[in-house]
Amino acid sequence: MKRVHLGIALAAMLVAVVAAGCCHRPKDVVCAPNPDRRIVASILDEQAVAAVQRQRAIYSWHFAPGTADLTELGRRDLAIIAAQDKTRPGTLHVRLGSDDMREARLAAIRTYLESQGVEVARMNFDEDWPGGDGVGGEAAARSVTPDAAGPMPILIAPAMGSPASGPAPSNNRY
C-alpha cells in the first residue's frame, strides 16, 4: 500500500514539475529570435545580394503577372542594383520577353531606379543573357573532345584503395 501512495506522490510531483516548466506567453510578448537562425539567415541574405549584384538582371517574374507592377522580389533586386549603381551605373540585363508589357515594365524599372538616386541616363539596358550567349551543346562537346569527329571517351577509374589504383590517399595534405 505504501508503494502505491509513494508512486502516486512521485507521479504528482512529476506532473507539477512538468507543469511548472511549461510557460504560456501572452500574445503581445515577443521573444528574441534564435541566434543560430539569425546567423544562417544573414549568410543566405549575403549570398542572395551577391548573386543579384553579379547577375544584374531583371526578368518577367519580377513583375506581377500581366502588369508593369514590380513584385517585392523585383523591388528588392532593383534596390540592390541601385545601391551598387549610385556611384557607377552599369549594364542591366532586362529579359522581359516579347510580351505586350515590355515597354511599360522598362519604364517601371527606370522610374524605380531614379527614385533610388541612380542616374538612369548613364545606365545601359540590354536584352542579352547575363553571362552572354553561351555555347551550344555541340560546340561545348567539341571543345572538350580530343577528336572532334569522334565520341568523347568515358574513363572509369578503379575504386580507391584497390590494387589497380594503389593505396588510398591519406587525409594529410602535407
Image: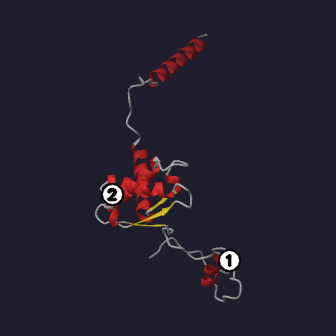
Q: Nearer the viewer, residue 80 or 95?
A: 95
Q: Is residue 156 left or right of residue 124?
A: right
Residue 147's spot in the image, x, y percent? Answer: 66, 89
Q: Is residue 94 left or right of residue 35?
A: right
Which one is closest to the eye, mark 2 or mark 1? 2
Q: Earlier in the sequence, mark 2 or mark 1?
A: 2
What amino acid does circle 2 point to?
Ala
Mark 2 residue crowding within 10 angstroms, few (<14) / some (14–19) / many (20+): some
Q: Quadrant of residue 30?
A: top left
**Residue indicated by mark 1:** 158
Q: Which mark is residue 83?
A: 2
Q: Nearer the viewer, residue 56 or 18?
A: 56
Name the residue at the left extreme: 87
Q: Quadrant of residue 7?
A: top right
Q: Is residue 174 above or below residue 103?
A: below
Q: Is residue 71 left or right of residue 151?
A: left
Indicate the secondary structure of the residue bearing disc 2. Answer: helix
Q: Quadrant of the C terminus?
A: bottom left
What amino acid does circle 1 point to?
Pro
Q: Quadrant of the N terminus?
A: top right
Q: How is the rendered protein coloured?
A: secondary structure
